[in-house]
Image: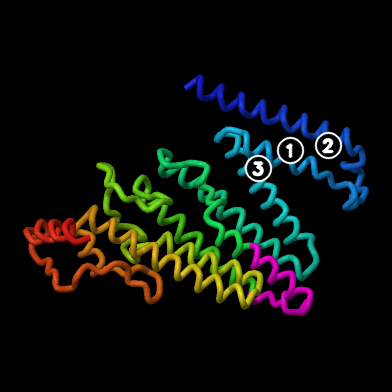
């Protein structure tokens, strides 16, 4: 325990030393890079070396430090969102709300996973590197907001719509985090293909009302972020893209769940829906009847043979 703690402290110290060195190199090569006392910074003061050193720092640092770096920038992003939502121009306030929800989502994904299932937590638990498509979608939403604000500035000041988006995001976040907390050690960001002795079929709590509450929460959160920005194109696009993604993921995941839990999961499917519209998941042949306890054993064997 002591070695681990000292290792983390050592990483933090090394990070601080590196940042100090980077700052020295940047300020040495470009003394006017940092201006204080509320003096305005022009684009000429931007130094590409600082970007290079920062990227290099993130790449070469070990996992513990990379976690700290990501958490730091997410915190900075949330701070920026709060400032923008309070002191920014009227049409940019909703962008601040969006940034707050976006940064909180990624930070809380890691935090809740670390608390509920620490054995599976990793750098990927932030979900920042979820996929290329996810990154493109986030960029597209920002571009749509800026373009529409430029063309139709009054469009981004309809507060009722943004408030509706905030409510949707709160509901989505609540559903997802409730699902993770309820599933606890049974939750994983990656679809499991191998059964572990600790795996348990969770059918209580939020899982009494839908089979995949974490996906339901993410779906509505993603749509809500675009409603906040009042992005009509991305609202539809995010909804369709998320729906398609979860339809395929749920289908694959339920094949694994039926393999793991057999007739118990088939019976659970019959009682509880997925929670997402028009998504049924993987349906085991309907002619398979499960009425008695003995039928579960027979069905489990059929599933192992056919799935």
Question: Residue 241, position in %: x, y?
Answer: 50, 70
Q: Which residue is mark 2?
A: 26
Of residues 208 and 263, the one nearer the viewer is 263
The stretch of residues the image draws in magenta is 139-161
Question: Residue 59, position in %: x, y?
Answer: 62, 38
Tag of residue 72? 3
Q: Residue at x 58, y 39 (%)?
A: 67
Quadrant into which the C terminus falls: bottom left
State left or right for residue 16 relative to residue 212: right
Question: Residue 257, position in %: x, y?
Answer: 28, 57
Q: Residue at x 23, y 69 (%)?
A: 270
Is label 1 in a helix, a strand or a loop? Answer: helix
Query: Residue lying farthest top?
Result: 2
Task: Tell me, yes or no, whether the two marked residues, 1 and 2, touch with CB atoms within 8 Å.
Answer: yes
Q: Residue at x 77, y 33 (%)?
A: 22
In the picture, residue 222 is in which quadrant? bottom right
> Of tags 2 and 3, which is closer to the observer?
2
Q: Earlier in the sequence, mark 3 or mark 1?
A: 1
Q: Is residue 153 magenta?
A: yes
Distance from disc 3 to disc 1, alpha carbons, whole Å, reads: 17 Å
Q: Earlier in the sequence, mark 2 or mark 3?
A: 2
């Amino acid at each position: 325990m002591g070695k681990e703690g000292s290792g983390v402290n050592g990483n933090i110290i090394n990070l601080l030393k590196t940042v100090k060195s980077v700052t020295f190199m940047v300020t040495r090569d470009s003394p006017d890079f940092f201006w204080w006392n509320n003096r305005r910074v022009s684009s000429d003061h931007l130094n590409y070396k600082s970007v290079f050193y920062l990227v290099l720092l993130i790449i070469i640092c070990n996992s513990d430090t990379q976690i700290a770096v990501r958490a730091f920038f997410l915190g900075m992003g949330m701070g920026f969102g709060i400032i923008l939502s309070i002191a920014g121009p009227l049409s940019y306030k909703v962008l601040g709300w969006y940034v707050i929800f976006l940064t909180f989502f990624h930070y809380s994904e890691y935090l809740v996973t670390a608390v509920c299932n620490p054995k599976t937590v990793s750098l990927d638990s932030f979900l920042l590197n979820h996929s290329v498509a996810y990154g493109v979608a986030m960029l597209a939403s920002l571009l749509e907001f800026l373009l529409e604000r430029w063309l139709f500035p009054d469009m981004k000041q309809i507060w009722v719509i943004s408030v509706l988006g905030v409510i949707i995001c709160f509901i989505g976040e609540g559903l997802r985090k409730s699902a993770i907390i309820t599933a606890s050690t049974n939750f994983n960001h990656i679809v499991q293909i191998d059964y572990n002795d600790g795996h348990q079929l969770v059918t209580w709590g939020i899982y009494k009302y839908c089979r995949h509450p974490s996906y339901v929460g993410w779906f509505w959160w993603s749509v809500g972020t675009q409603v906040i920005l009042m992005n009509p194109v991305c609202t539809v696009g995010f909804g369709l893209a998320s729906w398609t993604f979860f339809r395929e993921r749920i289908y694959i995941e339920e094949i694994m769940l039926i393999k793991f839990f057999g007739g118990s999961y088939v019976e659970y499917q019959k009682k509880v829906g997925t929670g997402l519209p028009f998504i049924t998941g993987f349906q085991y042949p309907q002619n398979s009847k499960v009425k008695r306890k003995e039928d579960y054993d027979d069905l489990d064997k059929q599933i192992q043979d056919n799935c």
